[in-house]
Image (cartoon, rainbow, N blue to C red):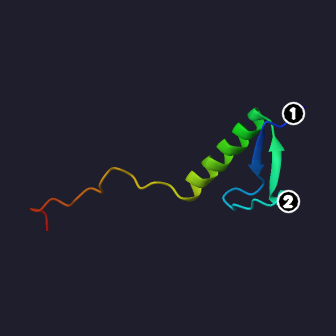
Amino acid sequence: MRPSAFCDHIEAKKDDHSMEGLQGVCGPCHDRKSSAEGNAAQKANPRPGRRRPPEQHPGIL
């Protein structure tokens, strides 16, 4: 067990700065938790693709 080096929000993006909403974590645990939260946020709200959908040729009816 490592000593706490970071103060972390227990629930991500809640901005609960009360003592009950915060926890102390070590650097590697903070990095792992933050990465997992970021990955979950990207999966929940993915960026739109950069490719345009194919358009029908103007000569084809």
Q: Position of residue 57 (x, y in %)?
A: 15, 59
From what the image shows, is residue 52 above or below residue 35? below
Judged from the image, the secondary structure of the residue bearing numbered disc 2 is: helix
- Disc 1 designates what residue? 3
| Label 1 crowd bin: few (<14), some (14–19), many (20+), radius 10 Å | few
The single residue placed furthest to the bottom in the displayed view is 61
Q: Residue at x 41, y 56 (%)?
A: 48
Which quarter of the rendered picture does the C terminus lie within? bottom left
Q: CA distance from mark 1 to mark 2?
A: 19 Å
**Going by the image, does 39 lie left or right of 16?**
left
**Amino acid on which the number 2 mark rests in the picture:** Glu
**Amino acid on which the number 1 mark rests in the picture:** Pro
Q: Which of pointers 1 and 2 lies earlier in the amino acid sequence?
A: 1
Q: Residue at x 74, y 62 (%)?
A: 16
The single residue placed furthest to the front in the displayed view is 18
Identify the mark at residue 55; answer none if there is no mark.
Answer: none
- Disc 2 designates what residue? 20
**Going by the image, does 56 lie left or right of 4?**
left
Q: Position of residue 56 (x, y in %)?
A: 20, 61
The single residue placed furthest to the right in the displayed view is 1
Q: Residue at x 78, y 54 (%)?
A: 10
Identify which residue, 17 or 28, lies in the foreground. 17
